[in-house]
Amino acid sequence: MSVLLGHVGTALVVVGALVLALAGVGLLRLPDLYTRASAVTTASGLGVGLVLVGVLLHHPSLGNTVKVVLAVVVQLTTAAVGGYAIARAGYLTGVPLAKRTRYDELGAVVRTARGGPERPGRRRRPGRRRGRGRG
C-alpha cells in the first residue's frame, strides 16, 4: 500500500507542478491584467493543493494531514482575496480591458460612485441630497 501511495503522491506532485507551469504560460500569453490575475489565482490554488496532497501521500500522518489541510485552506483563501484585490486595484487605476472583453459590469458602479451617470433603473428620490446627514 505504501508503494501505491508513493506513486499516486508523485503523480499529484507532477500534475500540480504542471498546473503551476501552465499558469506561468498564461501569465505570459493572456491579453490583460484581469485574465492573468484570474489564471494565476485559479491555477495557484489547484497547483499548490495538488502538490501538498502529493507530498502528504509520501509522508502520511495525522500531524501532516492537519498541516496540509490548513495550508490548502489558507492558500485558497488568500489567493482568492489577493487576486480580487489586484484586479480591482488595476481596474480602479485605469488598466485597460482586453479589446475582446464584452461586459464591464463594474464600470457602472464606479461611474456612479464618482458622480457620473447613474445605473439604469435606479433613481434618487426628489428633494433628497446625497452625502448629507440628517439634522
Image: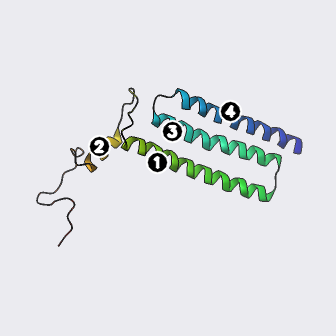
- Tell me the residue at 51%/39% (across/down): 37
Q: Is the Cβ of the residue at disc 1 closer than 8 Å to that at disc 2?
A: no
Residue 125 in sight in this render: yes
- Residue under the image location 67 percent in, 45 percent down: 49
Residue 72 in the image, given as x and y percentages of width and height: 65, 51
> In the rendering, which numbered label is found on residue 122?
none
Contact (CB < 8 A) between labels 4 and 1?
no
Instruction: Using the image, tell me which numbered label, if any, was put on residue 18.
Output: 4
Amino acid under disc 4: Leu
Residue named by callout 1: 85
Q: What residue type is disc 3 on? A: Ala
Which is more N-terminal, label 2 or label 1?
1
> Closer to the camera: disc 4 or disc 1?
1
Earlier-in-chain disc, 3 versus 2: 3
Q: Mark 2 — residue? A: 108
Hey, which residue is sitting farthest front in the picture? 93
The image position of residue 50, as x and y in percent, is 69, 42
Q: Residues within 10 Å of mark 3 (few under 14, many from 20)?
A: many
Q: CA distance from mark 1 to mark 2?
A: 19 Å
Q: Earlier in the sequence, mark 3 or mark 4?
A: 4
Which three-letter amino acid code belongs to the residue tagged 2? Ala
Question: Which residue, given by chain and number where applicable, does mark 3 sit on?
Answer: 37
Q: Quadrant of the N terminus?
A: top right
The residues tagged by marks 3 and 4 sit, at their Cα atoms, a distance apart of 18 Å
Q: How is the image coloured?
A: rainbow
**Residue 111's quadrant in the figure?**
top left
- In the foreground, 34 or 12: 34
Circle 2 SS class? helix
